[in-house]
Amino acid sequence: MLLNKGEILFRQGESGPLFRLRGGLLKILRIHADGTPFLVNLITPGETIPHHSLISPNPYFGTAVALVPSEAEVISAPEWYRQMEDDPAKCRDVALQLQDKLRMMQQRIDQLTQVAPADKLRKLQAWLRLYIGPAQLTDVLTQDEIGQLIGLRRETVNRLLRAQRAEG
């Protein structure tokens, strides 16, 4: 399944299949009761999602949106769970996938625990460059989303990005 930038793979609260991201980059948005979106996760190639449903089914926690042109493989949930019951190697594969995601989240925590806001932004830019190549961070995320990922207000992100541009 091919997704263009901005297309939705699944919506918060719906139920359905699992997906493996073959290429591209997705963001997971949690939509609050007042309609305000909050960026909670980024999905990179090779990940099977939703993570919270890899072992047992659950409605989608958030809405998955393509940040760049992306390709996702649809995985039948009943078949996935049957394989989990029948094949111990499948359970190990899922454990390794979850371990990789935990390590990625540890990197995100490292970004958040930087003291200087400029360092938080630089760490996020360096990490995302692995997935978006020569594109700029602001080509795929809004300043609000950048702030949500690194714990800064949008105004601070704006000021830091302007300072980076001024430095060249």
Image: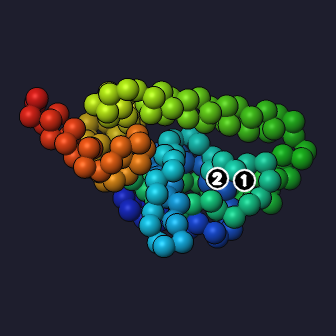
Residue 132: x percent and y percent?
35, 40
- Residue matched to label 2: 50
Q: Amino acid at mark 1?
A: Ser
Up/down of 110 relative to 145, above or below: above
Report which residue position mark 1 lands on. 53
Disc 2 crowd, CA 10 A, few/some/many (<14, 14-19, 20+): many
Q: In this view, which residue lies farthest toward the bottom?
A: 34
Q: Quadrant of residue 114?
A: top left
| Amino acid under disc 2 | Pro
Image mark for residue 117: none
Is 15 or 41 nearer to us in this picture?
A: 41
| Residue lying at 81% horizontally and 38% vertically, measured from the top left | 91
Q: Secondary structure at mark 1?
A: helix
Residue drawn 29% across the image and 50% down it: 154
Secondary structure state at the residue bearing disc 2: loop
Labels 1 and 2 touching (C-beta < 8 A): yes
- Could you say which quadrant of the image residue 135 lies in? top left
Q: Is residue 77 left or right of residue 5?
A: right
Q: Is residue 152 visible?
A: yes
The x and y percentages for residue 98 are 68, 37
Q: Which residue is more in the foreground, 82 or 102?
A: 102
Q: Quadrant of residue 36?
A: bottom left
On the rendered structure, is 166 left or right of 154?
left
- Seen in the picture, residue 79 relative to 118 is either above or below; the reply is below
Residue 89, how many percent across, how many down? 82, 34
Q: CA distance from mark 1 to mark 2?
A: 5 Å
* Residue found at x 36% / y 43%: 152
Q: Which residue sits at x=38%, y=26%?
A: 115
Q: Name the quadrant of the C terminus.
A: top left
Of 50 and 123, which appears nearest the observer? 123
